[in-house]
Every structure is written in structure tokens, then in C-alpha cells.
Image: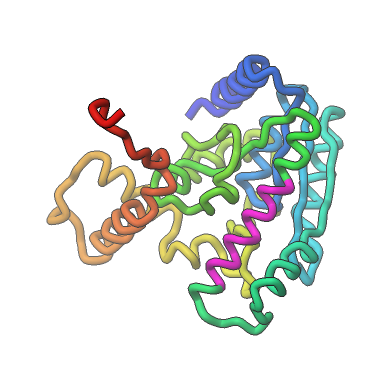
Amino acid sequence: MKTKKIVEHIVFWLKEYILKSKSNGFIIGISGGIDSSLTSFLVAETKFPTTILEMPILEKERNYLSIKHAKFLKSKFNNVSYLKKDLSTMYTSFCKIMNINNKETDEKTLLALANVKSRIRMLTLYYYANKKNYLVVGTGNKIEDLGVGFFTKYGDGGVDIYPIADLIKSEIFLLSKELNIPHEIQKADPTDGLWEDKRTDEDQLGATYEELEWAMEIVKKKYHNNLFNKNQSKIIEKYCNMHKKNSHKMNPVPICKIPDHLK
């Protein structure tokens, strides 16, 4: 893999896009995870104004990885500004209006609330983006955005551009190593930070990124299931089920077309 060439390609693509869009800069939410860390580094490489925004919601401990990454970026780029906005009050106000108690354990409600958190962050990003005429940058990777739809519709999926959405997780690790992203971030378990129990992305997915990326390639090549053992077949089935279930996130919003003879 030509990591340096890929970095150059993405940075060039970002520069071209922002010039065509006539925007003034970029804004990106950071979590201390490898995807947002790599994406924000690539965006900063454009030399255009780049705001990195940390948005904790009811976090009991400070996210030291976000802070570490913010310091790392600011030490390398003078076009980077860092903001932190605690959105806990906005979230708890929503829960109060909806009569949701803080001891809720129903899994469907917990998922809905995790999505609410993601959408509150999206609102915040676009507030600043609108004020400054910035582009909101997405941090999703190929398996999440095109494979299993592991993102919140109109939450972290509500963005203007996706610089790393054509990279699988293993490629993201290689690029992060090339760019010397802090070691702790490279080794940290991927998590969206939306759950009280701090479950990781792979806990939620029920499979590793490596397994799902393998299944994505198998499905793409249309290999027959009889070629695989029981565990491999389960992973393929899991991938296909998630892809089908979440296809509404990955496909354009359906439009009811009115026939010409009715107009």
C-alpha cells in the first residue's frame, strides 16, 4: 500500500473540494479515536482553517485521548483551532422533555438515546459550520459507511464530505502509523462514545472490523457459502443482515415519482 501517495491524494482532493465549494475552512468532531484523528490530520494538512471540536455528553472522565490529539495537531499546524463544548445540558433537557429517566434499561430506548446524542453533536457542528462557512467533515470508514451502515442517520452520517470512506480499518491504521498519530490512539479500542456502559464499536457490531471487512470482500466477489466453515458463514450472514437492515442509511432518500400523465 502506497501510504504516502494516498495521503497526498486525499489532501489534494480536500483542497480541490473546498475551493469548488467556496467554503472558508473545515470543522470536524474529534473523539480521540483513530478515524477522527486520522481525518483531522489529513484536513489540517490542507493548510485551510480547521476547527476540531470535542463534544462530551455526560462523560464522567475527561477524554484524555481527545486532549492528547488536540495538542498533537496544534503543535504541528498553525491553522488548527480547538474547541470543547459540553453538550450534557442539551441532552438532559431533551430527556426531561421526553420524560425519560436516567435509569432507563430498555435496549431500544438506549439505542434511540445514543442516536439522539449523535444528532445533538451534528447540530453543534453545523451551527459553527454555518457561522463560519465551513465544511463539516465526516470520519466514517468503508466498512461503516458502505458495508454495514454503522452510523447514525442525520447524526455522524450528517456531513458534507467523507475523506476516508474508501479506506478499510487496516488501511486507516497504516496511514495513521505513517503520519505518527499518537501511539495510544492507534492502540485504543474503537468506540463511538454514545453509551453509558462504554461498549466498543466491535461490541455493538458483534464482530471485529477484520471479520466484517473479510465478509464484505467475500460478498463482493460472490463466493458461494459452501466454501466456508460454520464460523465464517456466521460472519458472512451477520454482514449481509446488517447491510440489508441499514441500507436505508446508505441509499438516497426514496422519492415518490409522480407519473407525467397525472400532472
The residue sitting at 65% across, 51% down in the picture is 33
Left or right: 108, with 241 as reference point: right
| Residue 139: image location, x then y, percent | 60, 42
The residue sitting at 57% across, 60% down in the picture is 115
Q: Which span of residues is magenta-colored?
A: 110-124
Left or right: 53, with 161 as reference point: right
Which one is in front, 75 or 53? Answer: 53
Magenta residue check for 246: no
The total of numbered circles placed on residues is 0
Which quadrant: the C terminus?
A: top left
Q: In this picture, is 35 found above or below 92?
A: above
Left or right: 175, with 125 as reference point: left
| Residue 49: image location, x then y, percent | 80, 27
Magenta residue check for 113: yes
| Residue 244: image location, x then y, percent | 31, 53
Judging from the image, the colouring scheme is rainbow
Q: Main secondary structure of the magenta part?
A: helix
The residue sitting at 70% across, 67% down in the picture is 94
Residue 16 image-quadrant placement:
top right
| Residue 4: image location, x then y, percent | 59, 24
Q: Is residue 182 visible?
A: no
The residue sitting at 75% across, 28% down in the picture is 133
Which one is in front, 181 or 90? Answer: 90
Q: Can residue 43 be seen in this view?
A: yes
Q: In this picture, is 54 found above or below 159?
A: below
Which one is in front, 172 or 137? Answer: 137
Q: In this picture, is 103 found above or below 23?
A: below
Which one is in front, 157 or 184? Answer: 157
